[in-house]
Image (cartoon, rainbow, N blue to C red):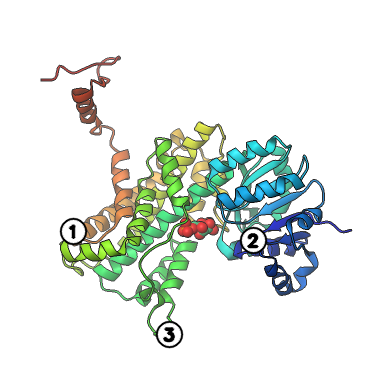
Amino acid sequence: MHKAQIGVYGLGTMGSALALNLAEQGISVAVTNREADWIAPFVDAAGPLADHLLPAPDLTSFIALLARPRAVLFMIPAGAPMDAMIAQTRGLLEPGDMIIDAGNADFRDTIRRSADLAADGLEYVGMGVSGGEQGARHGPSMMVGASAAGWARLKPMTEAIAARFEGDPCVARVGPDGAGHFVKTVHNGIEYADMQMIAEVYGLLRDGAGWDAGRIGAQFGAWNNGPLASFLTEATSAVLGAIDPDTGVPVVDVIVDAAGQKGTGRWTVIEALKLGQSASTIEAAVGARAWSAGQDVRGAAAQVLVGPKAGNMAAPDPDTMAQALLAGRILAHAQGFDILRAASDDFDWSLDLARIAEIWRAGCIIRSALLDDLAAALAAGPHMGRLILSPTISDLLNANVAALRQVVGGAMQAGLAVPSLAASLGWFDTIRQARGTANLIQGQRDYFGAHGFARIDRPGRFHGNWP
Ligand code: 6PG
């Protein structure tokens, strides 16, 4: 009997799209789903690609369809559902088989599961997949956490389905076990920051300059032809330009201003803090989503807390806005790559940051013209491994940060909220201070807690003779 090269469990949006992408590459794919009644309609809708699909009504027959050593890819909700699936599946597998978790998992779960399944001789691969439905169907960016042997097995299949940037497949083994999911988590943290800063610029144009959605959308469309070119810039233009068929007004004007979040942005910030890193731009974006969800409090606060009148902002010129957004985007990426560098040291992953930037140049949600520059800067080996110390990136920042300062300053004077843009600028000004103000913090700590401090003029640990 003909066996499948891989099995895809979970025929939701992303799982179906990945299965069809694999099938399109001529790879035979066993497919199944928890709700068995989804399977036949999926295969029917696959058209000629159904020739490469082997549907199974349940987990046991699904596993039986797989060629040995087996590769089972799960695209199901992260957390407890994945643990439950592992518990059901592991007894059906044998040493040498592989489970691939392609969901947005917490990398700590991936490390734990990987060690647990290794006891049965099974490899557990954590694979971050970015690009949404279209990406999964026609070419995602994939960040793989696997052993070298596991990667050797997965490489041909994943390279066949990956997005390509100038012919280079946007997939890599970034490290072992949890490394792939960690890199995907930080990708999402940067995604949150970029989306938030775009939304802040939208807010300035809407509430500061009084532009309507169509005009702002057209502006993002124009920006997409310059240094801000990116999937998210383009998506923003499309979203702002869409009209609600029921009311005839822009769709964006009928959408409730409360953002959802599944957790990856929050995890980025949590892990950054654990690593002693600053992810202030990303944190502001996660916080802004949380505040957006507290609509009742915002509604009440709007009645009692006063600020400058809306529409008070001097009309910002679009070039300045674009430069401000670019500076914010650079700083958010710099924070993201700093987190990756710190995690690489902490977990001993030897992450290749340049390769990570390269596989983000196509297929993923944060793909952008900027990522090409960042990849080149990282490949050149910036001083201390820091993007902000790369000559090309510091030049780019210096050329654009005055606009960020102007926009943030203007927004603050006008009482318009720009938490992520402001956090970016705050970090920029902090990190370029050769002499900061933490000498006072150390003095305070020693004053009330005798924590001691270092002196600038001699080695050792000292205490002040405080009054
Ligand atoms: C991607 C996306 C994708 C999804 C996340 C984020 O890279 O393709 O990040 O994984 O959009 O689920 O979702 P939330 O905004 O709900 O956290």
Q: Position of residue 135 (x, y in %)?
A: 59, 62
Q: Viewed as shown, does residue 157 lie left or right of 319?
A: right
Residue 292 percent across, percent down from the top left: 34, 61
Compared across the picture, whether 182 is left or right of 245 comes to: right
Of tags 1 and 3, which is closer to the observer?
A: 3
Marks 2/3: CA distance?
A: 32 Å
Amino acid bearing label 1 = Gln
Q: Earlier in the sequence, mark 2 or mark 1?
A: 2
Above/below status of 408 relative to 318: above
Q: CA distance from mark 1 to mark 3?
A: 38 Å
Residue picked out by circle 1: 413
> What kind of residue is marked 2?
Gly
Decide if residue 63 is on the left or right side of residue 74. right
Numbered tag placed on residue 15 in the rendering = 2
User: Dot 3 lies on which element?
Assistant: loop
At 62% from the left edge and 58% from the top edge, which residue is drawn?
163
Label 2 and label 1: CA atoms lie apart by: 48 Å
Label pair 2/1, CB-CB below 8 angstroms: no
> Circle 3 is placed at which residue position?
246
